[in-house]
């Protein structure tokens, strides 16, 4: 697959900027943008938080794996994955084979500030949301570290992150 056709997949923790950066990157590269969570919501007919509440995380992860496989049958996309997608080793292998996987990172305090405490973040529900966020970051760190490239987004605007990705893609070949 020619580099110009290879998918670009963004991973990283919730609120790292995957969706907003992915949309802007797709516009700049004249590619189609796919938000994996949004694709799951369309297929299931309900929001991610409702899937977690009504059917549980295991059901969501199974749906996520199926939708990811469908999406990765295509080429030339910019894909925003869910924050936990790459924790599944099969998903991680597939993403690395079918796309250039870029991890967006930010300090825990920045992620917590961006994520907020509303019901849209089902994995942060309960007491001590900030501690839960840090624990999830620890659990997912090894998977995130396996991305082809990593970009710290904490102090950058969306456009600056997109510029950095484009610069790195150029250097990556």
Image (tube, rainbow, N blue to C red):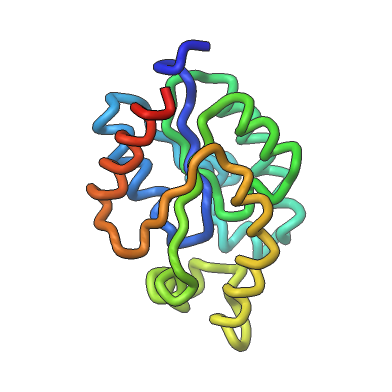
Residue 27 occupies quadrant: top left
Closer to us: 2 or 41? 2
Q: Residue at x 45, y 69 (%)?
A: 107
> Residue 11: x, y in percent?
52, 47
Q: Is residue 101 above or below residue 173?
A: below
Query: Looking at the figure, which quarter contains the C terminus?
Result: top left
Q: Residue at x 58, y 73 (%)?
A: 133
Report the number of numbered marks. Answer: 0
Task: Give the residue displayed 31% in from the left and 48% down from the top.
Answer: 161
Identify which residue, 51 or 136, lies in the foreground. 136
The x, y position of residue 130, in whole percent, is: 54, 81
- Residue lying at the far top of the rendered structure: 2
Q: Residue at x 24, y 49 (%)?
A: 160
Farthest front residue in view: 171
Work out whether residue 114 or residue 44 is closer to the camera in this orientation and state it. Answer: 114
- Give how far across and how far down residue 121 sits, in percent: 53, 68
Q: Is residue 47 left or right of residue 17?
A: right
| Coordinates of residue 116 in the picture (x, y in percent) | 42, 75
Question: Residue 96, located in which quarter of the rendered image?
Answer: top right
């Amino acid at each position: 697959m020619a580099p110009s056709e290879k998918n670009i997949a963004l991973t990283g923790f919730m609120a790292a900027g995957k969706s907003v950066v992915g949309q802007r990157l797709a516009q700049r590269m004249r590619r189609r943008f796919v938000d994996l969570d949004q694709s799951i919501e369309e297929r299931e007919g309900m929001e991610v938080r409702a899937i977690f509440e009504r059917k549980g995380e295991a059901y969501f992860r199974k749906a996520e794996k199926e939708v990811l496989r469908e999406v990765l049958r295509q080429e030339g996309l910019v894909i925003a994955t869910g924050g936990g997608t790459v924790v599944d080793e099969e998903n991680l292998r597939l993403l690395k084979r079918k796309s250039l996987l870029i991890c967006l990172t930010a300090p825990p305090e920045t992620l917590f500030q961006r994520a907020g405490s509303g019901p849209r973040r089902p994995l942060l529900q309960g007491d001590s949301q900030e501690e839960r966020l840090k624990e999830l970051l620890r659990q997912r760190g090894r998977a995130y570290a396996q991305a082809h490239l990593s970009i710290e987004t904490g102090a950058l605007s969306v456009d600056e992150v997109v510029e950095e990705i484009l610069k790195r893609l150029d250097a990556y070949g």
